[in-house]
Amino acid sequence: MKITVIGSGYVGLVSGACLAEVGNDVLCLDVDANKIRILNEGGIPIYEPGLEAMVKRNKEAGRLRFTTHIPDAVAHGDIQFIAVGTPPDEDGSADLQYVLAAARNIGEHMTGYKVVVDKSTVPVGTADKVRTAIGEALTARNATINFSVVSNPEFLKEGAAIDDFMKPDRIVVGVSDDQAADMMRQLYAPFQRNHERLIVMDVRSAELTKYAANAMLATRISFMNELANLAEKLGADIELVRQGIGSDPRIGYHFLYPGCGYGGSCFPKDVQALVRTAHAAGQDLKVLQAVEDANEVQKHVLAQKIIKHFGEDLSGKKIALWGLAFKPNTDDMREAPSRVLIEELFKCGATVRAYDPVAIHETQRIYGDEPRLEYAQNPMDTLEGADMLAIVTEWKEFRAPDFAAIKAKLKTPVIFDGRNLYDPTHVRAAGLSYFTIGRH
Ligand code: NAI
């Protein structure tokens, strides 16, 4: 099939590459000329395991191309995916300006029937707005062309995006007509494995499904974070509690890990957007508002532990920081808890020496020439001249360090672990003080 993907970021690029991988003819569009230049020159603008090789393979096979030229992109695909960003606007609602700009572009240039697919995470009712935007653009050029608008939210996880797209748990498709439903079935046929993964529903339900999924996951995290904080006060160990409740199949083990707050490009903004959508519809989502409030508190927990231990004046202190990305296997720094920690430490007069396997470049882009932030080549190198160690991202390479070497290097032998990576007994046996989220 001929497919256009509008927006070549984390979702658009992965979707485009995976759709090409199964034999489709894919053209990816982006307004960011630099991104398209990098892709056309054989590079890749983001870090995502396996993506570079997949893009290369499909480019060489002639099935995957990149452009900034809107008319070509609209002309190409019978299916037009909209995979642009939907960042929060000032009040936390999803900002639809990029989605609607993409819709207008389609309306301005289409010459035949198109299935327009909202892949971006968009509030309930957006498909209607997309339909209106395309309709208005067609009217402005006196054109009458049939089109369908479909909601097909994306559930991929950064860091495992290719596997998630190629082997999905489910593919949610919201449609309002049979022609579009048939095309979506055909499009996703190669991704069905031993049983049907496609869940076809009405458009509004599909739009809400995406928010419901992220809201549920964020709820589990905030719930566990609050319980971890309580466990600390009560002298219980949240890790044992986690095992104790996760073994109940009604609860399950997934997403029960307490930490220093959720971040990333999805949970914070999607939780906020759903709260705003509900409020506008006349219903306050009290549970979800609490989820967000608890997360705001949690992002400061690590800094507070450091301040409690060392006092509010951290001037002259250097903190070694392991991990910058909001989670492992990505370079995404959007809403990363590391940023909250770094900024709190700066406020207290400290400097930071940080290491992350892939997100240093992105951090440099955000913080520029910030003199209080220096970068190390590897985890042990962060400890040079450092007073203490803080951990915010659970990269695999942090999981089995040499604690004796850490103790020897730090001025004060103390670790503040925002991801509960180690057995406390083991760390303390090496002579280090160890602060966790909810363990003793
Ligand atoms: P991103 O910021 O990485 O990529 C968006 C791209 O769209 C950018 O490259 C931007 O230049 C481009 N763009 C903006 N306006 C455009 C236009 N009019 N025409 C062409 N290109 C345009 O964003 P990301 O992370 O890929 O997210 C996209 C959507 O997918 C968001 O709604 C997000 O909530 C959703 N999503 C993201 C997931 C993730 O893990 N990043 C997972 C599931 C959904």
Image (cartoon, grey):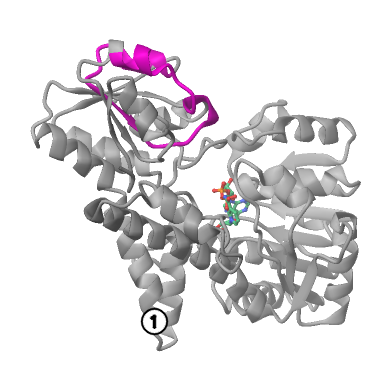
Q: Is residue 344 above or below residue 261?
A: above
Dot 1 corresponds to which residue? 279
Determine the residue positioned at 61% across, 72% down.
209
Determine the residue positioned at 91% across, 46% down.
23
Which quarter shows the C terminus?
top left
Where residue 366 appears, x then y in whole percent? Answer: 38, 35
Determine the residue positioned at 67% across, 49% down.
12
Q: Examine the structure image and report whether residue 391 is included in the region drawn in magenta.
A: yes
Which one is in front, 10 or 437?
Answer: 437
Where residue 305 appears, x then y in whole percent? Answer: 21, 41
Q: Examine the structure image and report whether residue 341 is included in the region drawn in magenta.
A: no
User: Can residue 68 be seen by looking at this rendering?
Assistant: yes
Q: Is residue 29 left or right of residue 382?
A: right
Q: Which residues are magenta?
A: 379-407
Q: Is residue 407 left or right of residue 381?
A: left
Residue 63: image quadrant is: top right
Q: Secondary structure at mark 1?
A: helix
Which one is in front, 389 or 119?
Answer: 389
Determine the residue positioned at 38% across, 75% down.
287
Q: Is residue 83 above or below residue 18?
A: below
User: Can residue 71 be seen by looking at this rendering?
Assistant: no
Where residue 87 appears, x then y in whole percent? Answer: 47, 58
Q: Is residue 439 above or below residue 138?
A: above
Residue 143: image quadrant is: bottom right
Where residue 439 appears, x then y in whole percent? Answer: 33, 45
State how many labels appear: 1
